[in-house]
Amino acid sequence: MTYRAEILFGKIIKSFGFEGALTVKTEKIFNNKILEMGSVFLEIEGKPVPFIIDRCEVVDDSLIRLTFNGYDSFEKISKFIGCRVFLTSEIELDNSENDLHQLEGYQIYESGNNLLGTVMKVIENPGQVLLAIRTSLNNEILVPLHQDFIISFDKKKKIILMDLPDGLTEVNQ
């Protein structure tokens, strides 16, 4: 997914119910596109954060109700009210499915632009996706592929910039 600030999809105006649904005010030209997409970016504190769409419901010409993967309560989504929603790249709009194995070969950088290594394999466990990364020292480490860790994603350059918790890379070497 790449962040395209020029493709503003809408703004989250309120929550809906108690199961993590958000109501997004949109331009009606986008309502038919959102059903094809698997993810969007929310602008949180000025930075794009990717979210995987779990459910999508078109309410009317300018309102859509979204539920994100892993966000199933009012407490988890209440901080997103007022956030702007951006579409991911147009390339992703054409893909009917996101194949995580396409990440093999991507280079992973930590914040501070330090090269962590190259994705050798994507391990899809129930509830968690792991990246098997070969480091420059030829070690293999496992890193969770989680939206909270991703800072940016460049599909053209095959680079993912991540902000990993301290000690995570040392734990599984």
Image: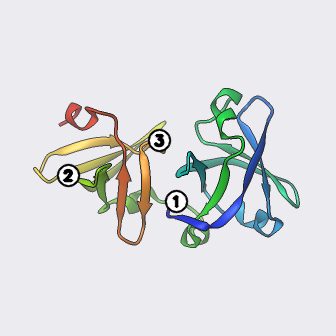
At 71% across and 29% down in the image, what residue appears?
Answer: 74
Q: Quadrant of residue 128?
A: top left
Is residue 22 or residue 45 the one in the foreground? 45
Q: Position of residue 116 (x, y in %)?
A: 23, 50
Q: Nearer the viewer, mark 2 or mark 3?
A: 3
Disc 3 element: loop
Q: What kind of residue is marked 3?
A: Asp
Judging by the rendered image, the residue that carries numbered circle 1 is 98
Q: Position of residue 78 (x, y in %)?
A: 69, 33
The circle on residue 28 is: none
Looking at the image, is mark 1 or mark 2 earlier in the sequence? 1
Q: Position of residue 82 (x, y in %)?
A: 71, 44
Q: CA distance from mark 1 to mark 2?
A: 23 Å
Q: What kind of residue is marked 2?
A: Arg
At 32% across and 61% down in the image, what residue appears?
Answer: 106
Q: CA distance from mark 2 to mark 3?
A: 22 Å
Q: Quadrant of residue 34?
A: bottom right
Placement of 139 over or under 35, stated as above or below? above
Judging by the rendered image, the residue that carries numbered circle 3 is 148
Disc 1 element: loop
